Amino acid sequence: MSALAELAALEEQDEFSRRHIGPSEAEIAEMLKVVGAASLDDLAARTVPSAIRQADLSALPPPATEAEAIAELRALSEKNRRLKSLIGMGYNGTVTPPVILRNVLENPGWYTAYTPYQAEIAQGRLEALVNFQTMMADLTGLPIANASLLDEGTAAAEAMALAHAAHKGKGNTLLVAADLHPQTLAVVRVRAEPVGITVKTVAPAEITAAVGLEKPFAILIQYPGTTGEVRDIAPEIKAAHDAGALAIVAADPLALCLLTPPGEMGADVVVGSTQRFGVPLGYGGPHAAYMAVKDAYKRLLPGRLVGVSIDAAGQPALRLALQTREQHIRREKATSNICTAQVLLAVMASMYAVWHGPEGLKRIARRVHLQAALIADAAQKAGFALRHDHFFDTVAIEAGDKADALMQRALAHGFNLRRVDAGCVAISLDETVTRKDLVALDAAICEAAGCAKLGLGLLESPPRLQKALERTSPFLTAEVFNSHHSEHAMLRYLKRLEEKDIALNRSMIPLGSCTMKLNATAEMMPITFPGFADIHPFVPLDQAEGYFELVKRLESWLCAITGFAAVSLQPNAGSQGEYAGLLAIRAWHKARGEGHRNICL
């Protein structure tokens, strides 16, 4: 054997797949002997018909080692430009507490655990999910919340479906306030059309009057609005109820630490994202969403619901509740599919609340709001008007013909802002913003306005929330949210929960599913690289070149492997991939004039 051939053979032993899959040569030989095959190629030839066997994989690059793959991914992450994104729209900078980052997100005891069908081996995760449910029920002011959903857009669409089911098909119009996050509205529209629901948007000020005219089965309101406005939504909810409609509210959980909960205003369903509770931006996901409902709608609630039961020894225990809602039981009549959950991110968000507690969350919310008030004052002192007088974290500046200059000066100072329309620029503050950032934002505003810098010492922060909308009710009163605020206490709590579960770091799990796979350490590490973790989904495209290259490569590899002409990586769960596939098939039939074909076996 030549030196180069020997080198290649030695390098082959370090390929990622060998480490990841694991069997030794002796184990492979023993398994082949049992099934009567001479080699893996012989086994494949016997089991896969030649007509569908893929022989040419020349389009794929050669296998990489773990070290090579990590280096390649790090290089891709560094092609993304990390500016501070104050774009908002439901995605905000957040600080992941290191104790949660290392002991949950980077811990195989949490990220390799299986869907908790078997409560006996999932008590730790079930407790973390009860914490999530309690957190969201408390914050929203409703009695019951699930754990959890895929993202805010999906949650809003599920809320629409719940409201439609509650009306038993009487009425097919959903009335949406126009200050809903645009990406949420887009998802709702996509989900509405195939089931015959009409989505109508109206200006927030016109919702109350429009309810009487349109006779919707539900209304959908953002709280606070996508451009930051905090308004009293109680009259809109009352108008919906007077017309026999349900009221759905999409709410920011951090804002609910300071604002009157929608449940106290009469909302029937509240949805939203928990991303800003310690979960990195990640160019848009994954993040756990939530849904909270009135008790009357609990049997229509999608997603996992964890309840307290009694075990065989008569002790309190946790288990999945109301499972007759589930797809594996009720088939086409189901209202839920428990696989669609983003549980790891829900656990992170719940632990963020455990770590900070109610007082810590209120401090973060107050600081973010104060920062927004200071920036609003800077804008007004520079001569700009504000679109909204009342807001929580987002300041909408009417910059007129200076909007371009404001965007450019902010970019020069290292910030991405949101261009709402031709003359309006919005700035969404978050817990990562420092005093230094506030000084730089003040400078950008003054430079765009053509005036002298003011400095933080000259800025004022008059109240920007209506007194009538300030929260007065307590939240997160359970002991768990008031006990684990030191490193040691939190570390020990996380470890106690982890040890109640069986995950792949302990043993194989005798169940099979789409989630039955080991995410290797080398695969999980890159998601915490700052170049991947800190990118807002709506940054300018030239700031996400690493992501684009990553997506392009993966799409081309999947096309080469599957033989398809194109691949979409947009669905953030297998269930959503199935749904997107059904919509693609439906669109194909409609394009051929066969839109009447609506049965899927």
Image (tube, rainbow, N blue to C red):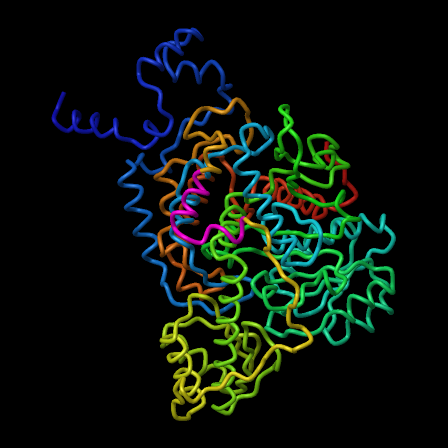
Whether residue 131 sits left or right of residue 278 in the image: it is: right
Q: Nearer the viewer, residue 322 or 38?
A: 322
> Which quadrant, please, contains the C terminus?
top right
Residue visible at 83% across and 61% down?
216
Q: How many marks?
A: 0
Q: Which residues are magenta?
A: 480-495
Tell me which corner region of the image, top left, top right, bottom left or bottom right, holds residue 44: top left
Q: Nearer the viewer, residue 336 or 365?
A: 365
Secondary structure, magenta segment, majority class:
helix
Whether residue 235 sits left or right of residue 90 in the image: it is: right
- In the rendered image, residue 485 lying in the magenta stretch gets the answer yes
Whether residue 532 sits left or right of residue 238 in the image: it is: left
Whether residue 537 sits left or right of residue 310 in the image: it is: left
Q: Nearer the viewer, residue 528 or 420?
A: 528
Residue visible at 34% across and 11% down?
29
- x then y, percent, for residue 183: 60, 61
Q: Nearer the viewer, residue 26 or 521?
A: 521
Tell me which corner region of the image, top left, top right, bottom left or bottom right, holds residue 127: top right
- In the rendered image, residue 285 lying in the magenta stretch gets the answer no
> Which quadrant, please, contains the N terminus?
top left
Residue visible at 55% across and 24% down?
511
Residue visible at 51% across and 42% down?
565
Do we see residue 277 in this rendering?
A: yes
- x then y, percent, for residue 519: 42, 36
- x then y, percent, for residue 593: 75, 46
- x then y, percent, for residue 510: 52, 22
Q: Is residue 561 above or below residue 284?
A: above
Q: Is residue 290 above or below residue 314?
A: below
Do we see residue 594 in this rendering?
A: no
Q: Is residue 329 above or below residue 33?
A: below
